[in-house]
Amino acid sequence: MRNLIVFVVLGAVSLLLRNSEAVDHEVGDSTGWIRPSTSSVYSDWATNKTFAIGDTLTFTFTTGAHDVATVSEE
């Protein structure tokens, strides 16, 4: 019985650790950060994603064509 409890606890911990890894999301996937043809392009993209604390968003765009600003929590 004790071995079963240890096995279950180790399994639960490994699942928690696996799910807590930060993910880098490329905004727009292979399309990148572009001027969308419709207003729903990025909201549709985000619908299929799960975001968590620690994740990052990468904006791939042509230099000089677009800009991205970093904002603080304030």
Image (cartoon, rainbow, N blue to C red):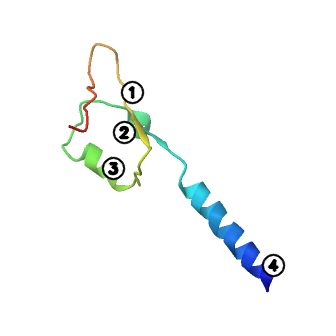
- Point out the tag, 1 or 2, that comes first from the N-terminus: 2
The amino acid type found where label 2 is placed reads: Gly
Identify which residue is drawn at 28% across, 28% down.
Answer: 70
Question: Could you say whether the residue bearing mark 2 is in a helix, strand or loop?
Answer: loop
Q: Nearer the viewer, mark 3 or mark 4?
A: 4
- According to the picture, the residue beneath numbered tag 4 turns out to be 3
- According to the picture, the residue beneath numbered tag 2 turns out to be 28
Q: CA distance from mark 1 to mark 2?
A: 9 Å
Q: Is residue 66 above or below residue 38?
A: above
Contact? badges 1 and 2 (CB < 8 Å) = yes
Q: Nearer the viewer, mark 1 or mark 4?
A: 4
Q: CA distance from mark 1 to mark 4?
A: 49 Å
Q: CA distance from mark 1 to mark 3?
A: 16 Å
- Point out the tag, 1 or 4, that comes first from the N-terminus: 4
The amino acid type found where label 4 is placed reads: Asn
Residue 23 position within the rendered picture, expressed as x and y whole percent measured from the top left:
49, 44
Frontmost residue, 71 versus 28: 71
Frontmost residue, 4 versus 24: 4
Contact? badges 1 and 4 (CB < 8 Å) = no
Horizontally, residue 10 falls left or right of residue 34, namely: right
Question: Could you say whether the residue bearing mark 1 is in a helix, strand or loop?
Answer: loop
Identify which residue is drawn at 55% across, 49% down.
Answer: 21
Identify which residue is drawn at 60% across, 56% down.
Answer: 17
Q: From this viewpoint, which residue is outermost toward the bottom? A: 1
The local crowd at label 1, few if under 14, some if 14 to 19, many if 20 or more residues have their Cα within 10 Å, is some
Q: Is residue 18 above or below residue 65?
A: below
- Point out the tag, 3 or 4, that comes first from the N-terminus: 4
The amino acid type found where label 1 is placed reads: Thr
- According to the picture, the residue beneath numbered tag 1 turns out to be 60
Frontmost residue, 35 versus 58: 58
Residue 15 position within the rendered picture, expressed as x and y whole percent measured from the top left:
61, 63
